[in-house]
Amino acid sequence: MQTISLDTQVREHLERAAGANSGRSAATVYAGNEHGLRQTILALTAGSGLAEHDSPGDATLLVLRGHVRLTVGESSWEGRTGDLVPIPLARHSLDAIEDSAVLLTVAKSG
């Protein structure tokens, strides 16, 4: 079994995001055909985000560092370090209010 340091991943991806034109950096840290879920670290600089996109299915965001806003239509939810934010089964967007890193967990179907 391999141990992954989320603190190290957060630090590295926030540095990469700071140097990227998009203000983002991401990497899948756990996945595979034998696993029923996928976990991805996503780092965003303040003011950057992910434009509206379809829901990946059953999923959550764990805010590892920072402050983010998840928006679905007219509704939004904010998460800060340590918060777990369920992702609704609807089109949504994600914005970083400050430099942030989240762990996206998606349950694979089928």
Image: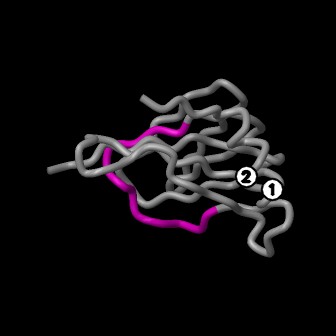
Residues 45 and 7: in front is: 7
Secondary structure beneath dot 2 equals helix
- Furthest residue toward left: 110
Left/right placement of residue 46 relative to residue 8 reads right
Residue at 77 percent of width and 60 percent of height: 17
Residue type at numbered disc 1: Thr
Disc 2 to disc 1, C-alpha distance: 10 Å
The magenta segment is 50-61
Left/right placement of residue 3 relative to residue 30 reads right
Pair 2/1: label in front: 2
Left/right placement of residue 4 relative to residue 110 reads right
- Residue 86 is situated, as x and y percent measured from the top left of the image, at 46, 36
Characterize the local packing of mark 1: few (<14), some (14-19) or many (20 or more) Cα atoms within 10 angstroms.
many
First-in-chain label (2 vs 1): 2
- Residue 27 is situated, as x and y percent measured from the top left of the image, at 57, 55
Residue at 20 percent of width and 49 percent of height: 109
Residue at 72 percent of width and 33 percent of height: 7
Query: Residue 45 occupies which quadrant of the picture?
Result: bottom right
- In the picture of the structure, the residue carrying the numbered disc 1 is 45
- Residue 94 is situated, as x and y percent measured from the top left of the image, at 61, 55
Secondary structure beneath dot 1 equals loop
Left/right placement of residue 109 relative to residue 26 reads left
Q: How many marks?
A: 2
Disc number placed over residue 13 in the picture, else none: 2
Residues 21 and 72: in front is: 21
Residues 40 and 95: in front is: 40
- Residue 6 is situated, as x and y percent measured from the top left of the image, at 64, 34
Residue type at numbered disc 2: His
Query: Residue 46 occupies which quadrant of the picture?
Result: bottom right
